[in-house]
C-alpha cells in the first residue's frame, strides 16, 4: 500500500522545502515534486508543516516508584504521545538492587509487550553496579539493542549509586560502545536538606523545592562531567534545569569534552513560583524541581548555543489521589508530572511561534538529536528516503487550549490547565500507518514496536 503526502512544507533539522513524500509500507520511498504515482492514498498537506515524528527520550510509563506506579500504562502513555506528535519514546527500566539487569528487562517487557501503540525503547537504569552487573552490559548493547545506561546520583537509599560504581559502570559502558546518562543532583546534600526541613516541621511542597537548591544540581553535573571526562565515557545529563548545571557542561566543553544535555518542556516554561500554591504545588513536585526565570532564559539560550541538545518531558504522571500520599509530608509526594502529550505543541507555540528558536532547531531538539544520540539515526529522527515513515502533519496557525478535560494522558489534572497554544498536530504517521487523524487514534494497542538501537559515541 502506498501513501502520498502532498503539498506540504517539509522541515528537517537542516532543510526547509516544499515537496511530496511517497511512503511504501513502513518507510519513505522517495521525496520529490510531481512524483509519478498511481494508486496511492493521498494526504493533502497544503498549508501544513511536515516534520519527523517526535522522539521523547525521557518517559516513565507504568513505573513502580515511591510506593506506587506512574499512572500512564504503555497503552495510554504512547496513545497520548501520538496525539501530541511523539511517535517514539524511550522509557527507563529500573534494576532492583541485588537483582540482575536481565530480570529487570524481563519485568519491563512484561508491561510493555503488546501494549504500546507508539514505538518505544528502553534505557537501563543501573542501581547496583557490581561484578555481575558488569558482565551484563555487553549483552544488553550487542544483543538487546539497549545502548544507554541511566544512573541516579540522587534518591539516596533507593536508586542512588556512589561514585565508585559510577566510574566502574562508565569504564565498562565505554568499552562496549554505550552511553551513560545521569540524574545529576547531589543525593547526600538533598537527603540532608529533606531531613532538616522535616525535623523543623516544614512539610509543604515548597520544601521539596527548597531541599534541592541549584547548587545540588550544579555540583553533581560537574562531578558527572569530570568522571565521564576521566573515563572517556560518552555522557548525557537528563532533565537539566538550571544555569549552574549548564555552566558545568560549558566547563567540560572547554577541555573539548562533549557532555550531551537534555532539558524538559516544564523547565523552559514553568517556574518555582508554582510551589507557593500550598498543596496544589504537589502537581509540580518533580526532581529536580522547577527553577527560576533566569534558568529558563539560560536554557533557551543553551538550546540556541547547541549546549542543550534535546527537549524531553520526564513524563511521570500520578493521579491527584496518589499525589495526596504526601499531603502531610512533601517527601512522600510521588515525584513526577504529566507532559508526554504536550511537548511538541508547547515547544512549537512557545519556542517557534514566539521567535525563541527556529523551525530547524525545533526539529533538532524534539527528534533528530535524540535519534542521533541514542543510535537510531537516520531510521528515526528525519525525513529521507529509507527512513521510517514517522511523520507529523502540523498546522502552525491553529489555536487551542490545554486541559485535563481534553487530554489523553491517564491523569486527572493538567500541569498546563488553560494554557493557550498556537500550533496543532493534525495527522501522524507511524511507520507508514495513519496513527492520528482528526483527534482520533487509528492504530491498535500492540502496533508500537520495540526499537533496537545501535552503538553510540557520545558526539553530535
Ligand atoms: O520527578 C521525577 N523526575 N520523577 C521521575 C524520576 C526521575 O527522577 O526522572
Ligand atoms: Zn530523574
Ligand atoms: Zn525521569
Image (cartoon, rainbow, N blue to C red):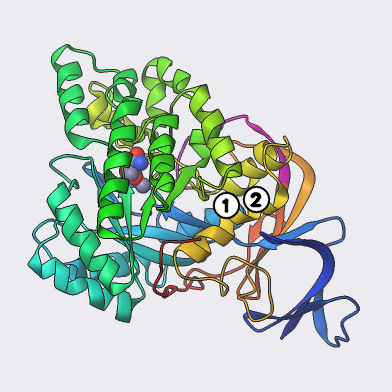
Residue 416 on the magenta segment: yes
Residue count near mark 1 (Cα–Cα under 10 Å), binned few <14, some 14–19, many ≥20:
many
Where residue 192 appears, x then y in whole percent?
15, 25
Query: Is 195 on the left or on the right of 365, as rendered?
Result: left
The secondary structure type at the circle numbered 2 is helix
Residue 135 on the magenta segment: no
Ligand 1 - quadrant of the structure image: top left
Where residue 227 appears, x then y in whole percent?
25, 50
Nearest the eye: 79 or 250: 250
Mark 1 Cβ inside 8 Å of ligand 3: no
Where residue 191 appears, x then y in whole percent?
17, 30
Residue count near mark 2 (Cα–Cα under 10 Å), binned few <14, some 14–19, many ≥20:
many
Tell me which secondary structure the magenta stretch mostly adopts.
Answer: loop
From this viewpoint, is residue 295 visible?
Answer: yes
Marks 2 and 1 sit apart, C-alpha to C-alpha, by: 6 Å
Q: Magenta residues, as a range?
A: 410-423
Report the disc number at residue 365.
1
Image quadrant assignment for residue 429: bottom right
Residue occupying image coordinates x 41% and y 62%:
458
Q: Assign the N terminus to one quadrant of the image.
A: bottom right
Where residue 116 appears, x then y in whole percent?
45, 66
* Residue named by callout 2: 361
Q: Quick check: marks 2 and 1 in contact, CB under 8 Å?
A: yes
Residue occupying image coordinates x 49% and y 28%:
295
Query: Is 213 on the left or on the right of 190, as rendered?
Result: right
From this viewpoint, is residue 414 visible?
Answer: no
The secondary structure type at the circle numbered 1 is helix
Amino acid at each position: 500500500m502506498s501513501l502520498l503526502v502532498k503539498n506540504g512544507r517539509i522541515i528537517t533539522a537542516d532543510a526547509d522545502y516544499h515537496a511530496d513524500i511517497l511512503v511504501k509500507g513502513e518507510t519513505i520511498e522517495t521525496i520529490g515534486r510531481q512524483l509519478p504515482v498511481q494508486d496511492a492514498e493521498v494526504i493533502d498537506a497544503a498549508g501544513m508543516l511536515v516534520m519527523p515524528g517526535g522522539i521523547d527520550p525521557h518517559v516513565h510509563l507504568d513505573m513502580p516508584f515511591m510506593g506506587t506506579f506512574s499512572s500512564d500504562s504503555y497503552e495510554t502513555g504512547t496513545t497520548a504521545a501520538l496525539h501530541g506528535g511523539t511517535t517514539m519514546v524511550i522509557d527507563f527500566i529500573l534494576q532492583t538492587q541485588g537483582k540482575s539487569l536481565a530480570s529487570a528487562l524481563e519485568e519491563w517487557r512484561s508491561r510493555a509487550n503488546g501494549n504500546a501503540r507508539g514505538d518505544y525503547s528502553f534505557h537501563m537504569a543501573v542501581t547496583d553496579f557490581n561484578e555481575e552487573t558488569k558482565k551484563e552490559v555487553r549483552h544488553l548493547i550487542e544483543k538487546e539493542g539497549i545502548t544507554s545506561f541511566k544512573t541516579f546520583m540522587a534518591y539516596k537509599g533507593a536508586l542512588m549509586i556512589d561514585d565508585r560504581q559510577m566510574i566502574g559502570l562508565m569504564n565498562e559502558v565505554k568499552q562496549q560502545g554505550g552511553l551513560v546518562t545521569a540524574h545529576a543532583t547531589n543525593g547526600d546534600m538533598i537527603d540532608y536538606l529533606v531531613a532538616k526541613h522535616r525535623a523543623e516541621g516544614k512539610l509543604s511542597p515548597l520544601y521539596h523545592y527548597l531541599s534541592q537548591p541549584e547548587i545540588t544540581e550544579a555540583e553533581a553535573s560537574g562531578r558527572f562531567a569530570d568522571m565521564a571526562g576521566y573515563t572517556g565515557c560518552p555522557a548525557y545529563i537528563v532533565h537539566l534545569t538550571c544555569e549552574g548545571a549548564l555552566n558545568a557542561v560549558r566547563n567540560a566543553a572547554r577541555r573539548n569534552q562533549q557532555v550531551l544535555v537534555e532539558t524538559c518542556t516544564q523547565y523552559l516554561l514553568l517556574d518555582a513560583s508554582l510551589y507557593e500554591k500550598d498543596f496544589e504545588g504537589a502537581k509540580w513536585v518533580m526532581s529536580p524541581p522547577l527553577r527560576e526565570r533566569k534558568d529558563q532564559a539560560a536554557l533557551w539560550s543553551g538550546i540556541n548555543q547547541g549546549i542543550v541538545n534535546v527537549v524531553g518531558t520526564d513524563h511521570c504522571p500520578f493521579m491527584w489521589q496518589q499525589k495526596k500520599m504526601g499531603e502531610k509530608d512533601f517527601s512522600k509526594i510521588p515525584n513526577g508530572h504529566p507532559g508526554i502529550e504536550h511537548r511538541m505543541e508547547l515547544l512549537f507555540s512557545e519556542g517557534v511561534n514566539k521567535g525563541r528558536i527556529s523551525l530547524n532547531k525545533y526539529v533538532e531538539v524534539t527528534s533528530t538529536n535524540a535519534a542521533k544520540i541514542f543510535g537510531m539515526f537516520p531510521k528515526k529522527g528525519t525525513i529521507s528516503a529509507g527512513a521510517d515513515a514517522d511523520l507529523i502533519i502540523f498546522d502552525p496557525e491553529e489555536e487551542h487550549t490545554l486541559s485535563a478535560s481534553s487530554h489523553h494522558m491517564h491523569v486527572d489534572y493538567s500541569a498546563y490547565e488553560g494554557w493557550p497554544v498556537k500550533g496543532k498536530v493534525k495527522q501522524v504517521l507511524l511507520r507508514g500507518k495513519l496513527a492520528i487523524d482528526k483527534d482520533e487514534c487509528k492504530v491498535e494497542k500492540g502496533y508500537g514496536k520495540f526499537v533496537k538501537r545501535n552503538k553510540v559515541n557520545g558526539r553530535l
